[in-house]
Image (cartoon, rainbow, N blue to C red):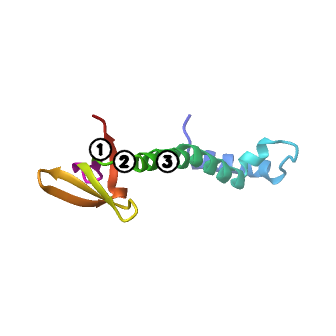
Amino acid sequence: MQFDLNSFLLLAQASDAGAAAPSAGNPLSLLTSPYGMIAVMFVIMYFLVIRPQRNEEKKRKTMIESLQKGDTVVTSSGIHGKVVEFKENNEVVVLAIAKDTNVTFNTSTIVKKKEG
């Protein structure tokens, strides 16, 4: 089926005629209204974007809280190091990245704890 401007206008007029007198008893009329569609989009966005992001942030927070001296971690810039000490209420961590080389990072830059 091919759509051109005339068929589009015909469909638009038909949908306007149906929208002029919405049925109060029809539960689907809420979903076909613009406000209903916006609400549906927010629900979809919540389940596809916001909820998984919150779950990942929770996992990351528990991982950072469980860090101890001697754990091997990876920072967001890709630097691998071993935790030497924590400073400033666990907001700053000192990592040993080589022999006699310690680097200071914010704990928010740690993205992964390496096992083993």
Q: Is residue 82 left or right of residue 56?
A: left
Q: Distance between the residues labelled 1 and 2?
A: 7 Å
The percent coordinates of residue 32 (x first, y second) are 72, 47
Please, what secondary structure does the residue beneath circle 3 have? helix
Q: Is residue 51 left or right of residue 19?
A: left
Q: Using the image as rendered, state which of residue 112 and residue 95 is in the foreground.
A: 95
Quick check: is 28 in the magenta stretch? no
**What's under tag 2, amino acid-wise?**
Leu
Name the N-terminal-most of marks 3 and 2.
3
Q: Is residue 24 left or right of residue 38?
A: right
Vertical position of residue 92 compared to residue 31: above or below: below
Q: Give the range drawn in magenta.
A: 74-81
Name the N-terminal-most of marks 1 and 3.
3
- Residue to which mark 3 is pinned: 58
- Residue to which mark 2 is pinned: 67
Q: Which residue is drawn at 28% across and 46% down?
A: 73
Q: Distance between the residues labelled 3 and 2?
A: 15 Å
Q: Residue at x 67, y 46 (%)?
A: 11
Q: Using the image as rendered, state which of residue 90 and residue 54 is in the foreground.
A: 90
Which image quarter is the N terminus in? top right
**What's under tag 3, amino acid-wise?**
Lys
Q: Which residue is drawn at 65% across and 51% down?
A: 9
Q: Do the residues labelled 3 and 2 touch (CB within 8 Å)?
A: no
Q: Do the residues labelled 1 and 2 touch (CB within 8 Å)?
A: yes
- Residue to which mark 1 is pinned: 71
In this view, the residue farthest toward the left is 99
The percent coordinates of residue 51 (x first, y second) are 55, 46
